[in-house]
Amino acid sequence: MECIWCQQLIYPEVTWSTLFIPEKITPLCKNCQAELQPIERIDCFDCGRQYNEKATKGDVRCTDCQRWHQENKHYLTRNRSVFQYNKQIQAMITKWKYRGDYSLIEAFADQIQQYFQTYYNDLDENTIIVPIPLSDQRLHERAFNQAEVIAEQLPLPIHHLLRRIHGEKQAKRSRKERLAISNPFQLYQPTNQPVLLIDDIYTTGTTLHHAAQILKQGGCPTVYAYTLAR
Ligand SMILES: [Zn+2]
Ligand SMILES: [Zn+2]
């Protein structure tokens, strides 16, 4: 058995219990697993980030999220992420989505499921999952939509309610420019059920806020988000 990331051999530990119940095969070696930093403390209730420096006491909303409120664009009830954004998760996500290494989802699947149970065990039973779509062109280039692969790990029905009408080249724009451009999403179909949006990375939150806005304008009561890294 090789580590899915560094290809180092993994030797399963044999103990009394593993003689009877085979130990779950972990896709990552101990070193690679240790490079990933799961979020252990929610410092901003809105976006679910963990500050690496100590959070200011009583500061339950980070400055990014305060801005969403000030601008009256706060359509997202909350985001929760599995991992802190660091070099390791960045490298893994890059290989996973840009180089089409689909199988890397195995490295994240367990934690995606566990963290979902922790953060979202209070969801309404009618809640549906809406993965953030890629534009048709991107999907064609990439062969799979990473948001959809994350969504497939979760025990809720997936509904494709959104369509992306312009491209994803937003990363190259400044925050102000991103906010100024019109919403890149269109609704295929409105819903009156609560929605959990799924994406790989929460950076500024612009993409998820745009998606939440259009769902709410169509009658969706509550929009949450779940992302792999923040
Ligand atoms: Zn490894
Ligand atoms: Zn925040």
Image (cartoon, rainbow, N blue to C red):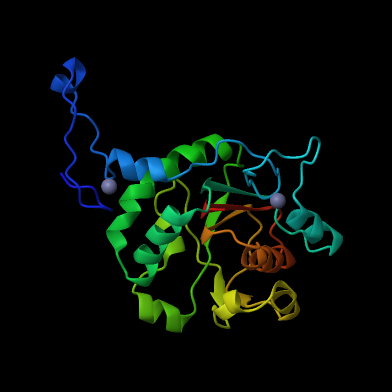
Horizontal relation, residue 188 to residue 179: left or right: left
Which of the two residues, 96 or 126, is positioned nearer the viewer here? 96
Horizontal and vertical percent position of residue 71 = 84, 65
| Residue 212 seen in the figure | yes
Residue visible at 40% across and 65% down in the picture: 94
Residue visible at 67% across and 62% down in the picture: 212
| Residue 121 seen in the figure | no
Horizontal relation, residue 85 to residue 194: left or right: left
Q: Looking at the image, is 192 positioned above or below residue 161?
A: above
Horizontal and vertical percent position of residue 211 = 64, 67
Q: Looking at the image, is 25 positioned above or below residue 90?
A: above
Q: Tally the numbered discs.
A: 0
Horizontal and vertical percent position of residue 152 = 40, 54
Which of the two residues, 71 or 162, is positioned nearer the viewer here? 71
Which of the two residues, 104 or 31, is positioned nearer the viewer here? 31
Horizontal relation, residue 158 to residue 217: left or right: left
Horizontal and vertical percent position of residue 203 = 60, 61
Residue visible at 66% across and 57% down in the picture: 192
On the image, which quarter does residue 218 sit in? bottom right
Quadrant where the N terminus lies? top left
Q: Looking at the image, is 176 positioned above or below residue 78?
A: below
On the image, which quarter does residue 188 sit in? bottom right
Q: Residue furthest top?
A: 16
Which of the two residues, 54 or 43, is positioned nearer the viewer here? 54
